[in-house]
Image (cartoon, rainbow, N blue to C red):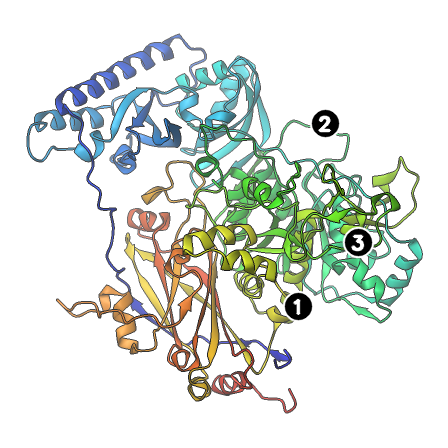
Amino acid sequence: MAPRNKAHLILPTRRSTFEYGPVGGGGDGRALPAPQDRRAHGATIRNTLESAERDARTRRAKRQPIVADAIPGTYVAFESFPGIELALESLDPRIGRTHPELRAVRTDQINGEPVEMATVFVPDGTMKYFLDRLDKYLETADEATTAGSNLVDRINAVHIATVQALWTDALAEFPDPAATVWWEVWLRRRDGNELDRLRTYANAVDLKVGRRALGFDSRTVVLVHASVEQLAGAIDVLDDIAEFRHPHDPAQFLANEEAATQNEFVQDLAQRVTTADASAPTVCVVDTGVHRTHALLAGSLPIEDCHTADPTWPTGLDDDGHGTKMAGLALYGDLAESMKDTGPVHLRHRLESLKLLPPRGQTNDPELYGAITASGTSAVEIGTPDRHRVYSMAITATTSEQSPAEPAEIALGKPTSWSASLDALAAGRGVIDDDSGIAFLGPAETDAHRLFAVSAGNVYNYDHDHLTRSDTEPAQDPAQAWNVLTVGAFTDHDSLAHAPEEYQGWSPLAPRGELSPFSRTSVAFSSKWPIKPEIVLEGGNLARSPSGAEIHSLRALDLLTTRSPTAFETTGSSQSLATANATSAATAQAARMAAQIMAEYPSLWPEAVRALIVHSAEWTPAMQAHFDAKSGKRDKRTVLRRYGMGVPDLLRATRSASDALTLIAQDTITPFEKGTMREIHFHDLPWPADVLADLGGIDVRLRVTLSYFIEPNPARRGWNGRYSYASHGLRFDVRRPTESNDEFHKRLNTKALEEEEKRPTSADEPGAWVFGSELQKSSGSLHTDIWTGTAADLAQRGALAVYPVGGWWKDRSSRHDDCHDSRYAFIVSIDTPGVEADVWTPVAQQIEVPIVIGT
């Protein structure tokens, strides 16, 4: 294997753009079952709707106060037949200035089958929309084609909506009706006064409303302290309610550990460190603050780069200790490695700190962490908007246990206000603070895209069968965010040689190269949600007693890092080092890697940096063994949801070799125009075709990773069709060896066909993709796959297409006649393992990269 001592090749833009028509499809081929008696069915629904409207008016007349500017109307809940989805777009007609509006959708499990519940706000005078359709349905009930059957046949029942009908989290999380608790209240943004109307109602009935709110395109989110009955009153008099959710509070941080080495080692290392200059990339540690005067941190973290989400909190301090631990790992990695060396340490990145949680001992009302994160990033960036940075976020929220009637795959992995905030911030949305304290996520700015590394969350109830435990413990909020780099933990720490004497005879719980027992996964997520984590990094291990009766966390199996003195005031310790573990430690190391890539390639976008990290990841032998044991691609995707793409490597992420070429491309596409797909990109890649052809039947490897950022639509209105969570999606395809460019175009793009011309018969795909089309169909904003085949076949594959799939931008462009651009980056690598072949030089010559003799 040749040394990795060559730069990756960043490609100039040389793609062709064509009008795009997607290849056909659509529908699942299943006929919709009709009710046994359509006439009786339609009459029942019609009568119920009229009754619900009368009841709502009666209830509204009895409520006080009647809020000025509120639109009178009725919240109606539509319930589907088991196993059937509602016709959501027909429930949200968008005709005229005032019309029924779909507000919330939830899927419940009843007798083992999914039942969809949709809540629609029907302003007074607009119930006619539904009644007219029901009249036509009844008039044609006995005919071969019944008008409105796609809407009405799906509806099992209709009733006036309750607070529970607007609840979009799992029913198992619905609060005790007798309790007064905090609720996450989602308001439909209509005229900018919805929060004022809510506060007016709250003041009249003695409710408490959180001081922070978070704004999205169509929703404002705020916390309210209320009972079910009090919120029921709000439904009667306010038209702004969209949905209710459970507020997710950040989990408790890891217990502080004592240092493993003495302070003189810190001073020795500090004398060997050369800090990066002020223009270097930074890791912004989003945590409990950082004790910036630590000898190993002070030179890389000036006081002006210490920020707080609340301006009243002190800066430059960490009274918990967790943030300081993360800062040490983000700057140095595992300090145990640096302590072993005696040579100089040249840092190429710096630190910033954002204190997201209040000082220890301070009692606050629950905060909306999406708003806090949004305003916190604004505080960080206001003075240095152009700085290259990655946010390292090892704060997650707990997820309640799912009841047997609420399978995890139904409820988990869904976006929340917090995860959607990270998606919006990553996509370049800014923060606009107004007098009411709202942190609006303003219009997206292309040059303001952000990279977040977020921990998958930790397992706390350990089990000897730690893989099964991790597979059933889903990644925690906000790790499900589409645009972030979610980080799990694996471990190579399997030695107890330095454990205390009382642990002699104990053994590591996880074998070397396996998932860390601390790490959560997305195996329990619904298949419609992204694969998380994308990567895993060292997170330490647990120890098991000889009898197997006990499982303990030991410092000997952790990582060494910096310590905040205020975290150990009760011990009187003056040590400067501590240990850390779990996905928090893994996330800080991932952020460090991102900053190092930014230092190496300053022209790369956050999308490309994320792609390079994932592209460099490989499964350990222990992970590969699980993967090889799975036969089907769906089974392999389960393994992917545990480990992601494996363990990333900085050298692979930053350097090519003569026999291991990596190409990087960055481009911008306009997915939609006037409600239709707009364009497809074909990239004619500089390709070492002659070298590969000469290798003939030798096996080689091709790897492709596509990364882009979506804009979120966090309102839970089904996330189907026009209600998609993602603004858009992108996919890639690679030319097959027997295809011409013209045939490649026509296989993917119906608009490349002449009138009445049929699509070319797809040639057989030689070689093998690890995941294939199953992974390409998965959600998320990063797609990667690996192909293995002969060098001769790969010689003919030097063309790649990037094309759009649906999203809510498509519908928006049809209504507003505007177009949105999407940046994307793709990474293509060629490896010729075990073969002396130079695939790097001919490609470098094609793109006119200077060749330096001896490199």
Crowding at dot 2, Cα within 10 Å, few <14 / some 14-19 / many 20+, comes out as: few
> Compared with residue 151, is residue 285 higher up or lower down, i.e. above or below?
below
Q: Residue at x 13, y 22 (%)?
A: 39
Comparing labels 3 and 1, the label whose residue is closer to the camera: 3
| Label located before the other in sequence (3 or 1) | 3
* In front of the other: 752 or 471: 471
Q: Amino acid at mark 2?
A: Thr
433 vs 268, left or right, is left
Circle 1: residue type? Ala
Q: Position of residue 666 (x, y in %)?
A: 48, 68
Q: Position of residue 321 (x, y in %)?
A: 79, 43
Which residue in the structure is indicated by mark 3?
560
Q: Which mark is residue 599?
A: 1
> Which residue, given by chain and number where applicable, does mark 2 sit on?
363
Q: For the residues labelled 2 and 1, say whether their Cβ atoms are less than 8 Å apart.
A: no
What distance separates the C-alpha of mark 2 from that of mark 3?
31 Å
Answer with left or right where residue 467 lies relative to residue 691.
right
Question: Is any atom of residue 193 visible in this view?
Answer: no
Residue at mark 2 to residue at mark 1: CA–CA distance: 40 Å
**Going by the picture, which residue comes out furthest to the left?**
143
- Judged from the image, the secondary structure of the residue bearing numbered disc 3 is strand
Q: Quadrant of residue 232?
A: top left
First in sequence: mark 2 or mark 3? 2
The answer to whether residue 847 is above or below residue 749 is below
Precedes in sequence: disc 2 or disc 1:
2
